[in-house]
């Protein structure tokens, strides 16, 4: 197949509630959508969520990177999934941003699957079905009067909340949540790199007394020595999880070697797409590091589908986040969003992965596009 057109869209969709955390407050989503159209009329969609505070990428840098790939893509041949994996791995090895790589990789996977009529779940060895994936709730910072009713309506088997920089409001939030979801429902805290070492020690010590045993990115990226001290002090009782400090495979190796965490938070966009995230996951398994699949706020059904596929391939996850669809977004890019029900499950036991199992509405794609770049007639020889 030959790719005739690549369209890149900067998407901003209003959120139903403000999504606030230690390093970001947002009223809308902020994604890149890549659409590949082949000579045989196959269509592939990819998505990523550039976050400067995570991978150093922003919307402009990702769009610039996608534009620079045009000449290179003209000479590539993708006859198998291995060819896609090889190309994305080469880009990451060059130091190209994970979000940029993710957007193209997911679009290539989608287009490849439709072009050759291959089910991605079957081809990649998914061990469980979509209905067996249990999702966790994620609660932003904010007024409990607005957030409490949301929590009350949902029966997720576990929850994570975005932590504050001081102890008192976090302890108050834990008690508020437990009053609604019960004392046995697991709760995780995500500091988003917002604590000092001294504050992390105090926060973790106090939260442990209330039964919270998971703490995501308590310290700033690069503070491996301090993070190791947290693992040494609390690792037998709690998960000290790496998120913003874990973007590349090299990051994963460094964190393991330094003993700077005992848990990984994985995201397809920040970890460079499906294949590289699987590579990091397998490294973690080999070294006794547990993993959860996290999500960026405002992901559309495209990234939800890719994340769901990852969870079906990598079943040993402690939690799976995302798939909130129009619970968080005012509108998704598909008229039938791929999203969880009130119990945190996707009711689709035989969901096909002939491409992503979502139909993107082109009208909505254009409606929410803030910037659109088209690369016409990009000749990519992709042989069957």
Image (spheres, rainbow, N blue to C red):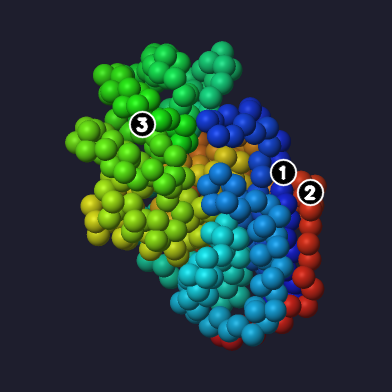
Q: Which residue is mark 1?
A: 12
Q: Secondary structure at mark 3?
A: helix
Q: Which residue is mark 2?
A: 370
Disc 2 versus disc 3: nearer the observer: 3
Residue 233 makes an appearance in the image: yes
Front residue of this view, candidates 152 and 319:
319
Could you say where residue 82 lies in the image, as x and y percent from the top left?
Answer: 46, 77
Q: CA distance from mark 2 to mark 1?
A: 7 Å
Q: Which residue is mark 3?
A: 197
User: In percent of the image, x 29 and y 30: which residue is there?
Assistant: 213
At label 1, counting other C-alpha atoms closer than 10 Å, the crowd grade (few under 14, some 14-19, many 20 or more) is many
User: In percent of the image, x 19 and y 36: which residue is there?
Assistant: 236
Q: Earlier in the sequence, mark 2 or mark 3?
A: 3
At label 3, counting other C-alpha atoms closer than 10 Å, the crowd grade (few under 14, some 14-19, many 20 or more) is some
Residue 352 makes an appearance in the image: no
Please say if the residues under marks 2 and 1 sit with CB atoms less than 8 Å apart: yes
Please say if the residues under marks 2 and 3 sit with CB atoms less than 8 Å apart: no
Q: Is residue 194 above or below residue 314?
A: above
Q: CA distance from mark 1 to mark 3?
A: 35 Å
């Amino acid at each position: 197949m030959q790719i005739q057109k690549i369209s890149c869209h900067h998407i901003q969709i209003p959120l139903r509630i403000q999504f606030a955390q230690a390093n970001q407050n947002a009223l809308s989503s902020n994604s890149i959508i890549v659409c590949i159209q082949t000579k045989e009329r196959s269509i592939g969609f990819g998505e990523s969520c550039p976050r400067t505070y995570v991978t150093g990428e922003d919307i402009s840098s990702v769009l610039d990177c996608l534009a620079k790939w045009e000449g290179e893509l003209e000479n590539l041949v993708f006859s198998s999934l291995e060819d896609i994996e090889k190309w994305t791995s080469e880009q990451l090895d060059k130091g190209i941003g994970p979000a940029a790589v993710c957007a193209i990789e997911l679009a290539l996977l989608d287009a490849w699957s439709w072009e050759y009529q291959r089910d991605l779940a079957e081809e990649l060895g998914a061990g469980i079905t979509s209905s067996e994936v249990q999702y966790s709730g994620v609660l932003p910072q904010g007024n409990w009067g607005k957030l409490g009713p949301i929590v009350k309506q949902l029966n997720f088997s576990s929850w994570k909340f975005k932590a504050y920089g001081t102890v008192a409001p976090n302890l108050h939030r834990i008690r508020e949540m437990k009053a609604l979801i019960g004392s046995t429902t697991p709760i995780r805290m995500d500091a988003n790199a917002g604590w000092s070492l001294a504050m992390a020690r105090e926060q973790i010590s106090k939260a442990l007394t209330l039964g919270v045993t998971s703490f995501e990115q308590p310290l700033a990226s690069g503070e491996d020595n301090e993070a190791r001290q947290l693992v040494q002090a609390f690792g037998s009782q709690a998960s000290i999880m790496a998120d913003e400090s874990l973007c590349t495979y090299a990051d994963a190796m460094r964190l393991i070697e330094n003993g700077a965490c005992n848990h990984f938070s994985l995201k397809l966009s920040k970890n460079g797409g499906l294949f590289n995230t699987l590579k990091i996951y397998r490294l973690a398994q080999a070294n006794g590091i547990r993993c959860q699949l996290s999500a960026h706020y405002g992901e559309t059904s495209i990234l939800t589908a890719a994340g769901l596929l990852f969870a079906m391939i990598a079943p040993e996850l402690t939690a799976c986040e995302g798939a909130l669809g129009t619970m968080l977004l005012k509108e998704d890019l598909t008229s039938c969003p791929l999203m969880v029900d009130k119990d945190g499950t996707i009711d689709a036991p035989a969901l096909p992965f002939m491409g992503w199992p979502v139909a993107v509405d082109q009208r909505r794609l254009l409606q929410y596009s803030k910037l659109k770049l088209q690369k016409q007639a990009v000749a990519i020889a992709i042989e069957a």
